[in-house]
Amino acid sequence: RPWNFSAGPSALPLEVLQQAAAEMTDWHGCGMSVMEMSHRGRQFTQIRDEAEADLRELLAVPDDYEVLFMQGGATAENAIVPLNLIARGGSGKADYILSGIWSNKSHKEAQRYGDIAIAASSGTEQVLDGIAQAPWTWFPGADTWTLRPDASYLHLCSNETIGGVEFSDWPDMAALGAPDVPLVVDASSHFLSRAIDFSRAAMVYAGAQKNAGPAGVTVVIVRKDLLGHALPVCPSAFDYANVAGADSMFNTPPTYAIYIAGLVFKWLKKQGGVAAIEAANAAKARALYSYLDTSDFYLSPVHAASRSRMNAPFFLRDETLNGDFLAEADAAGLMQLKGHKSVGGMRASIYNAVPLEGVQALISYMQDFERRHG
Ligand code: PLP
């Protein structure tokens, strides 16, 4: 198969696809496809329960957190989060860190539901380590955040898929003077690529279609004390308390997407779990960024300390070669490298299912292209 660098929906492990194909018409000898099963039947209940148990094990999710399988993607969560949390504590306030396109979208949506403030933003040019960083190519450090201690939550996006900016050093809210403000994280595009410190985050959500499975299921991991505060206008199917109370079966869940996500979780356990995949991801990112940094032909726009291990935007210094670069990459079996239209250039998304070998193939191609056109 060619190497697939799509930002999402993105590459899935081949073993997962093969297993799903083998089980397509007859799951474990029961005579039905998973798509044909009642979500309340014995077989699907087993699939769902195993998926949740495996995910809890992989991420060491504490017992006082609910794991919910929802629908609507991370975009719907931009509304579902304030609908569930903004009334908590009574202030009607929430604070947002702006670090790129996805956090800006979250912030914009939340404004419909309460008193929403910007705690920090990277939307300006900033000189860091002696280099002028363009807007949205760096992450504002926690020491610069302006927090409201009575806010119902603080929201951030820990991996900006489009800008390629990652923030992994989640702060202790108490140390920032806001002990009662739960940290809510959109981790969509680096979910399951690294460990999560649940002593720092009260809620983490992720659309599955990067590291966790196919589009159609959104994973929400939320501390139990945040449940039960939904606004009266919150749709019942999006009220976390309802979804948790019904084991994510308040209405028909995205059964097939949950099944595939469950296979991905089992695949990840076989790889050695999150610690092993995190080490592999660090090695992949190191290889790609070191090459970008030593080349005069390509450049990485993101501040070195904030570069995403999952999504690496890069530019050819001579942008007239972009078309040739993409066409020849495609012909060489390196797919979906075109950067997002708002950023331009290229973007290599190197999620869990892309091994080091795939990154090495990309680097070899880039070296060869540089030799021929540099
Ligand atoms: N947040 C992040 C970080 C994303 O990368 C995406 C999609 O790529 C979204 C939110 C939106 O997700 P969805 O399209 O599933 O609504």
Image (cartoon, rainbow, N blue to C red):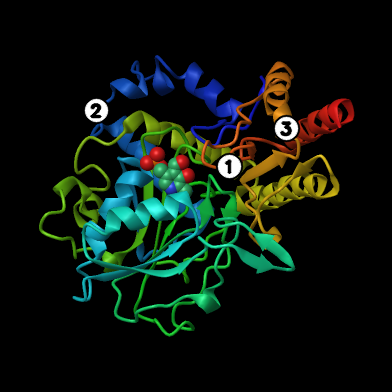
Mark 2 lies on a secondary structure that is loop
Q: Which amino acid does label 2 sit on?
A: Ser
| Image x and y of residue 91, in percent | 21, 76
**Marks 1, 2: nearer the viewer:** 1
Q: Residue at x 25, y 64 (%)?
A: 85
Give the quarter the ligand 1 occupies.
top left
Q: What residue type is labelled 3?
A: Gly
Q: Toward which corner of the image does residue 254 lie, by quadrant?
A: top left
Residues at marks 3 and 2, CA–CA distance in whole angstroms:
39 Å
Confirm whether residue 45 shows in the render.
yes
Residue pointed to by mark 3: 358
Badge 3 crowding class, 10 Å Cα cut-off, few under 14, some 14 to 19, many 20 or more, is some
Question: N-terminal of the two: label 3 or label 2?
Answer: 2
Image quarter (top left, top right, bottom left or bottom right) of the N terminus: top right
In the image, 228 versus 56, the foreground residue is: 228
Q: What residue type is labelled 1?
A: Leu
Q: Is residue 46 left or right of residue 267?
A: left
Q: In this view, does 48 lie to the left or right of 159?
A: left
Image quarter (top left, top right, bottom left or bottom right) of the C terminus: top right
Residue pointed to by mark 2: 38
Q: In this view, does 232 lie to the left or right of 152?
A: left
Residue pointed to by mark 1: 268
Disc 2 CB within 8 Å of nearest ligand 1 atom: no
Badge 1 crowding class, 10 Å Cα cut-off, few under 14, some 14 to 19, many 20 or more, is many
Disc 1 CB within 8 Å of nearest ligand 1 atom: no
Q: Which residue is drawn at 39% across and 32% down?
A: 257
Mark 1 lies on a secondary structure that is helix
